[in-house]
């Protein structure tokens, strides 16, 4: 470990929509170190993709209002032309939904070629073709020649996902952002892809940010973990520590909600839904669903604080003392 | 590409069938219009004999299907649409005289719509939510709600009458031996007379602009919204992160999918130009097809009406076929589905 390759301080993101302003991310800080594999988990709609897109400097096209104290990639702010260039050089991103992340009107070949050409200008046709074939083979794509000559609509979901991954990895970057990279794949391929990404990260000292609903995968692959709820980080720390001993009631519920190998089916999870971002609760955003919520939770938002005597463990909860006697035991 | 050809061929067959049905329906309707076209042409004092002769000559005493078959045979084999009762000469001659000018007018307008519509739409989208965008959106709104003749009057007043940049209506005259295609700009080029060509374009500029400006405005709005919608799409963000250059991103990855709605709307705009042209034609004293059509209809000239309807149908169909080909070339989703 060593330097921070990604550093976010006091990021706020709001979306301007027809109904009003969605206050999705009020105030978020996060960092990723060189060679580190960081997980980001939280239920659907908690703002994971938004954080990733902000890090990759692509919120500009959406109706987002972004404010931040600091957002640095490899030591350089992402603002300005130089900053943007630096982000493009150092960050690659695998998008969540393979059915929307490929251009429907261009052949796979054209899309890959345009990426390669900006990276390796003025090379021979054979060179580009060789690169594309290698990229597709690295994700064990069957019939790569045919895939190159196809439009996205001609490929299955899993094939599109693999195309996306191979395209994202064609660029040799320090940071790989993977937003649910394996949702559309079957289990064996999922393992392969994750291994591929993991290999890349380990061998070339790249850094990985992984978003996944599969907590088992996150547990296996990542070193450090951020747990997000309703646009805020509620708990962070070493992955092992969090899984072994979750503190925040949301984390406890989340881990509890995942299917266990030994148990029968899915546990209860957490009742209720993420609050509306139009008018989020003024105290703790989790309070309406929290089994431990008290008066103070509904009135005053807790801050993310370092736990005493811990290694980089942060939790944001008013009623932590209670957690020493576990409310829900997890992963027993 | 094979799928594309199959799709286009299918559309072509559709269009043929539609044209046949359309012409037959119009043909039948004409016969239902009250009033005898022969009597109204020959006048109340005509002898019964001459009325009968003309009725027989025009096939009006035969069953409807036979009349239609006769008409269709002549159209297909000789380009003969029958005789106009209004101008007392073959309808095809009238069409040959009036249609090229109107086609020229509409073609130049269509060109303006595409170029300026896409240009302003793109500028508006690239600078969305800035003052540039706001100005363009305001102007295009004005353009959409203002009728074309209002622009015609305004342009004539300012650019022709006050500034004298353009002629006040009318087109340059050609001596008959120089009329080859009937389209003045092409004829001027065929003569090798470049200054005449420029003069022709000058005469066409204001009428074309008046005819096109509403559509330019509408097209710009459609193109802007198509681009803005796609700008938000994940595939643009993905391509951007993956490192596609900015110019390729805008002019290829963003432009191509955005052109699909643009082109579809463009087809409708272009197809309706000819029908909307008659006010512009009379305002700018262009003796064209739209005016001729109106005269024919107002005078209940049966073969004239069927012919102009048929021509309108053909133009509509041809424009639509071109648009379909364009959309198919742009959108593999339609191509691959349509060929099934
Ligand atoms: N482009 C956008 N315009 C408007 N609102 C948006 C946009 N993108 C995201 N949002 C809103 O922001 C919130 C968080 O969305 P985000 O996609 O970041 O969640 P997520 O954690 O990635 O969810 P998931 O697990 O389903 O991918 C949602 O309420 C969503 O509606
Ligand atoms: Mg997401």
Image (spheres, helix red, strand yellow):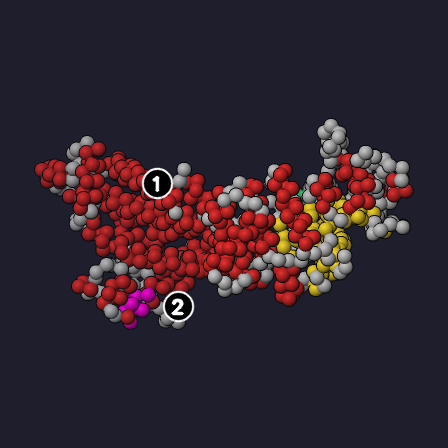
Visible residue check, residue B253:
no
Quarter of the picture containing the C terminus of chain A is top right
State the residue position of label 2.
B159
Q: Is residue A165 left or right of residue B251?
A: right
Q: Do labels 2 and 1 share a chain?
A: yes
Quarter of the picture containing the N terminus of chain A is bottom right
Q: Is mark 2 on a helix, strand or loop?
A: helix
Q: What element carries label 1?
A: helix
| Residue at x 21% of width, y 60% of height | B180
Residue A324 position, x and y percent, is: 89, 40
| Residue at x 23% of width, y 42% of height | B302
Q: Is the magenta stretch mostly helix, strand or loop?
A: helix
Q: Is residue A211 left or right of residue B64?
A: right
Label 1 Cα neighbours within 10 Å, binned few <14 / some 14-19 / many ≥20: few
Q: In which quarter of the image is residue A285?
A: top right
Q: In which quarter of the image is residue A30?
A: bottom right
In the figure, A23 relative to A256: above or below?
below
State the residue position of label 1.
B10
The verdict on residue A224 being magenta is no
Residue A7 position, x and y percent, is: 74, 58
**Furthest residue in direction top, as rendered:** A264
Residues at marks 2 and 1 touching, judged by CB atoms closer than 8 Å: no
Question: Residue A171 versus residue B82: which sits nearer the camera?
Answer: A171
| Residue at x 76% of width, y 39% of height | A254
Q: Mark 2 lies on which chain?
A: B
- The CA span between labels 2 and 1 is 47 Å
> Which segment did they paint magenta?
B195-201
Question: Residue B28 versus residue A241: which sits nearer the camera?
Answer: A241
């Amino acid at each position: 470990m060593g330097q921070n390759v990604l550093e976010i301080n006091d990021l706020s993101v709001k979306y301007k929509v027809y109904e009003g302003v969605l206050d999705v991310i009020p105030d978020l800080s996060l960092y990723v170190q060189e060679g580190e594999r960081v997980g980001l988990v939280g239920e659907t709609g908690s703002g994971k993709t938004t954080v990733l897109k902000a890090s990759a400097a692509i919120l500009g096209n959406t109706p987002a209002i972004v404010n931040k104290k600091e957002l640095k990639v490899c030591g350089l702010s992402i603002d300005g032309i130089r900053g943007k260039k630096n982000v493009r050089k150092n960050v690659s991103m695998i998008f969540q939904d393979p059915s929307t992340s490929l251009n429907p009107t261009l052949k796979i070949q054209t899309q890959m070629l345009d990426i390669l050409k900006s990276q390796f200008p003025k090379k021979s046709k054979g060179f580009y073709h060789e690169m594309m074939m290698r990229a597709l083979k690295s994700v064990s794509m069957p019939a790569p020649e045919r895939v190159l000559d196809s439009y996205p609509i001609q490929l299955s979901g899993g094939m599109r996902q693999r195309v996306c991954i191979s395209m994202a990895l064609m660029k040799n970057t320090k940071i790989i952002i993977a937003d649910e990279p394996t949702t559309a794949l079957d289990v064996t391929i999922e393992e392969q892809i994750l291994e591929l990404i993991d290999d890349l990260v380990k061998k070339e000292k790249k850094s990985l940010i992984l978003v996944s609903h599969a907590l088992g995968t996150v547990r296996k692959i990542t070193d450090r973990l951020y747990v997000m709820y309703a646009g805020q980080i509620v708990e962070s720390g070493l992955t092992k520590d969090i899984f072994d001993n979750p503190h925040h009631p949301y984390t406890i519920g989340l881990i509890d909600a995942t299917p266990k190998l030994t148990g029968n089916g899915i546990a209860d999870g957490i009742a209720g839904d993420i609050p509306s971002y139009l008018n989020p609760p003024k105290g703790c955003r989790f309070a309406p669903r929290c089994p431990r919520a008290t008066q103070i939770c509904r009135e005053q938002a807790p801050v993310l604080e370092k736990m005493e005597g811990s290694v980089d463990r942060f939790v944001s909860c008013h009623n932590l003392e209670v957690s020493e006697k576990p409310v829900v035991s997890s992963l027993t | 590409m094979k799928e594309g050809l199959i799709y286009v061929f299918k559309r072509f067959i559709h269009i043929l069938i539609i044209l046949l049905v359309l012409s037959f329906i119009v043909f039948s309707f004409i016969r239902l219009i009250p009033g005898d076209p022969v009597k109204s042409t020959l006048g109340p004092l005509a002898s019964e004999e001459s009325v009968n002769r003309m009725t027989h000559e025009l096939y009006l005493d035969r069953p409807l299907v036979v009349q239609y078959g006769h008409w269709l045979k002549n159209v297909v084999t000789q380009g003969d649409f029958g005789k106009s009762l209004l101008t007392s000469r073959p309808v095809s001659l009238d069409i040959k005289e009036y249609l090229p000018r109107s086609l020229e007018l509409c073609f130049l307008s269509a060109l303006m719509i595409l170029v300026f519509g896409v240009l302003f739409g793109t500028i508006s989208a690239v600078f969305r939510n800035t003052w540039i965008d706001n100005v363009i959106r305001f102007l295009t709104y004005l353009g959409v709600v203002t009728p074309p003749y209002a622009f015609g009057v305004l342009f004539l007043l300012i650019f022709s009458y006050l500034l004298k940049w353009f002629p006040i209506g009318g087109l340059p005259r050609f001596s008959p031996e120089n009329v080859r295609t009937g389209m003045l700009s092409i004829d001027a080029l065929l003569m090798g007379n470049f200054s005449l060509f420029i003069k022709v374009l000058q005469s066409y500029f204001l009428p074309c602009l008046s005819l096109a400006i509403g559509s330019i405005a509408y097209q710009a709005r459609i193109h802007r919204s198509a681009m803005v919608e796609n700008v938000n799409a994940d595939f643009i963000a993905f391509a951007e992160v993956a490192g596609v250059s900015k110019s390729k991103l805008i002019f290829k990855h963003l432009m191509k999918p955005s052109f699909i709605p643009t082109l579809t709307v463009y087809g409708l705009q272009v197809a309706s130009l000819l029908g909307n042209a008659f006010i512009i034609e009379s305002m700018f004293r262009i003796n064209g097809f739209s005016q001729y059509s109106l005269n024919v209809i107002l005078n209940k000239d049966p073969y004239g009406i069927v012919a102009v309807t048929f021509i309108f149908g053909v133009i509509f169909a041809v424009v639509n076929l071109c648009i379909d080909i364009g959309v198919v070339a742009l959108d593999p989703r339609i191509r691959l589905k349509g060929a099934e």
